């Protein structure tokens, strides 16, 4: 095991050097994609790096944003509204601005194009993780917060010893669905047009899109097999050990007799090399960090006590200055947007609202159909660890599988029975968004304390009593998070579901997603901006009328308490 760890560290170091050399080379906006299987390992490596760099950015953003929104009462409502808007904006709406900004920052280096693609993948991965962490912080049991206050934990101690552990299960399962979402949008983020320019990056997404455009079925099969192999390896080497490790953070007073196991985690825990590093490096560093944090906390409390009344801290002044600059930037952006929208005609606005209505119906139909099977299946997986060992890798593969690769087959089948893209788009939305609900339900079912399940067994609850008394209340906060992110994901997926290119044909249906895709391809920025605004307004309105009250219900009535 020690030799394996050393080899893995050396391989990681070599991979970093390889990526650094490629990223800092000269910019090549449109790379030629070869369909030979011999190029697949390199393409797969590039795509995997992009997805996991985007994931690390998403994880950091989710923790920082969710923490700020949960504990800053002044800006909580505004920050959640912004999160609602951002998660509803399709990837293609970010595309022109992100790529042009990155290319202007690094005009002669490949890193500009790479960062643009990574940020596009980031916009498809981050929002459900931010919602999950925010929801977990709002549902922390009161007695745990009181224990931290009594022991005078600093913010860092509270974060690392209470908040992150309590939110771990939800973050882990949402991390898996986020990475799966990254694979789902990979074909869009690695090969795309921006006005008159075409961008094509070497990667698995570009390979699959090139093969689909040329009708090369064998190349598509090779690409999909490569993607499945990567997903299986990631599940066994990364997600399975993390799931087994995160099980210790379940909030319960009685330990479950059945646990998810991982041979890789067992080997890591018994590695002499990693054990030595933990004892000699990580433990002293963490103890020194907490010691310095505790000293600074005591000094801050002393300064607050001795500070004269009426004095304004420097941080407050800096906060006011930053607020003024932010308000000025928002006003400037709003004025520019109004000037840009001035060129849109009235009939275009009417067409956009008609498309928004059709997309609204498809989104809600896809959520209803997805919930019908994901809730019972997710509860079954979460309640039975042995079943989870078998089905979780399959769910990960299915969630990561690019639905756009299956869509030609689905579309041909629907056309054969007399149905068109209008119904087919609902199927594609489900393929892209049902996993948000499934993975959150699994996390919620796994987080239900074992003692609650044992009480249900002791009192011989019927199936209906179990669902109404234990299961639905236990998974409720996770289910709401899954439904909110699935709703935003369905709106996001509409850009692919309602506008599909098959060989030399472009298939469209009436909807806001197809109008956004068409505007992006044509470089029609006014229509793209207005369509994005309409989509964001609709999502925010739904969240305010439906999801916000349900979130408050989850934070109050269905919070776990000792």
Image (tube, grey):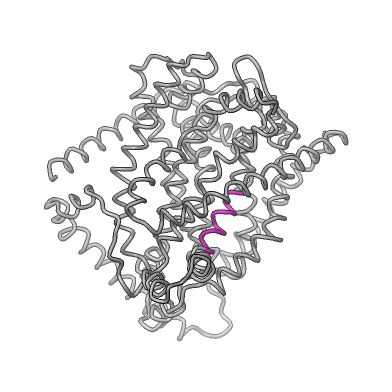
Q: Residue at x 53, y 73 (%)?
A: 313
Vertically, is 244 above or below 292? above
Q: Is 496 in front, or is 310?
A: 496
Chief secondary structure of the magenta portion: helix
Whether residue 530 appears in this view of the structure is no
Screen quadrant of the N terminus = top left
Q: Residue at x 76, y 46 (%)?
A: 335
Apparent side of residue 210 relative to residue 325 in the rendered image (left or right)? left
Q: Can you tell which quarter of the image residue 348 is in?
A: top right
Vertically, is 375 above or below 504? below
How far from the left and from the top, in percent, is residue 352? 79, 37
Screen quadrant of the C terminus = bottom left
How far from the left and from the top, in percent, is residue 556? 56, 74
Whether residue 501 appears in this view of the structure is yes
Q: Is 528 in front, or is 175?
A: 175
How far from the left and from the top, in percent, is residue 223? 41, 24
How far from the left and from the top, in percent, is residue 205? 47, 27
Q: Residue at x 85, y 38 (%)?
A: 350
The magenta segment: 476-487
Vertically, is 276 above or below 402? below
Q: Residue at x 61, y 35 (%)?
A: 92
Q: Can you tell which quarter of the image residue 343 is in?
A: top right
Q: Is 43 in front, or is 57?
A: 43
Q: Can you tell which quarter of the image residue 39 is in?
A: top left
Q: Is 58 in front, or is 390?
A: 390
* Residue 477 belongs to magenta span: yes
């Amino acid at each position: 095991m020690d030799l394996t760890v050393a080899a893995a560290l050396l391989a990681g170091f070599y991979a970093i050097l390889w990526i650094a050399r490629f990223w800092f080379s000269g910019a090549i906006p449109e790379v030629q994609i070869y369909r030979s299987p011999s190029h697949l390992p390199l393409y797969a490596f590039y795509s995997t790096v992009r997805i996991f760099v985007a994931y690390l950015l998403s994880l950091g953003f989710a923790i920082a944003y969710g923490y700020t929104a949960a504990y800053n009462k002044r800006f909580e409502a505004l920050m959640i509204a912004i999160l609602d808007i951002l998660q509803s904006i399709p990837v293609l709406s970010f595309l022109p601005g992100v790529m042009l900004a990155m290319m202007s920052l690094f005009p002669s280096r490949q890193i500009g194009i790479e960062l643009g693609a990574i940020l596009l993948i980031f916009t498809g991965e981050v929002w459900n993780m931010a919602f999950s962490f925010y929801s977990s912080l709002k549902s922390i049991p009161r007695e745990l917060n009181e224990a931290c206050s009594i022991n005078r934990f600093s913010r860092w101690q509270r974060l690392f010893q209470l908040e992150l552990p309590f939110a771990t299960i939800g973050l882990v399962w949402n991390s898996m669905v986020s990475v799966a979402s990254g694979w789902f949008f990979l074909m869009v983020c690695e090969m795309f047009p921006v006005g008159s320019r075409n961008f094509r990056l070497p990667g698995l997404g570009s390979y699959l899109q090139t093969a689909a455009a040329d009708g090369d079925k064998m190349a598509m099969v090779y690409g999909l097999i490569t993607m499945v192999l990567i997903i299986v390896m990631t599940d066994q080497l990364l997600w399975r050990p993390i799931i087994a490790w995160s099980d210790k953070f379940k909030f319960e007073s009685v330990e479950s007799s059945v646990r998810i196991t991982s041979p890789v985690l067992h080997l890591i825990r018994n590695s002499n090399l990693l054990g030595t590093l933990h004892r000699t490096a990580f433990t002293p560093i963490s103890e020194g960090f907490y010691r310095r944090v505790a000293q600074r906390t005591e000094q801050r409390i002393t300064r607050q006590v001795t500070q004269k009344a009426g004095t304004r801290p420097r941080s407050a002044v800096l906060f006011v200055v930053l607020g003024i600059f932010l308000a000025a930037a928002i006003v400037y952006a709003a004025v520019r947007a109004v000037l840009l929208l001035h060129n849109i005609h009235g009939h275009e606005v009417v067409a956009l609202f008609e498309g928004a209505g059709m997309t609204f119906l498809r989104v809600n139909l896809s959520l209803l159909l997805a919930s019908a099977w994901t809730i019972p299946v997710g509860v079954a997986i979460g309640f039975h660890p042995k079943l989870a060992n078998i089905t979780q890798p399959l769910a990960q593969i299915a969630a990561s599988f690019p639905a756009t690769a299956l869509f030609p087959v689905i579309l041909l089948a629907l056309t054969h029975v007399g149905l068109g893209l209008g119904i087919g788009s609902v199927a594609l939305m489900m393929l892209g968004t049902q996993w948000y609900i499934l993975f959150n339900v699994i996390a919620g079912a796994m987080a239900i304390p074992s003692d609650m399940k044992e009480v249900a067994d002791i009192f011989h609850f019927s199936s209906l009593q179990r669902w109404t008394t234990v299961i639905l209340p236990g998974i409720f906060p996770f289910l709401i998070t899954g439904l909110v992110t699935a709703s935003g994901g369905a709106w996001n997926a509409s850009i692919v579901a309602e506008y599909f290119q098959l060989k030399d044909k472009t298939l469209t249906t009436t909807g806001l997603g197809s109008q956004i895709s068409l505007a992006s391809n044509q470089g029609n920025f006014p229509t793209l901006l207005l369509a994005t605004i309409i989509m964001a307004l609709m999502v925010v309105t739904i969240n305010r009328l439906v999801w916000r009250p349900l979130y408050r219900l989850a934070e109050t009535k269905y919070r776990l308490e000792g």
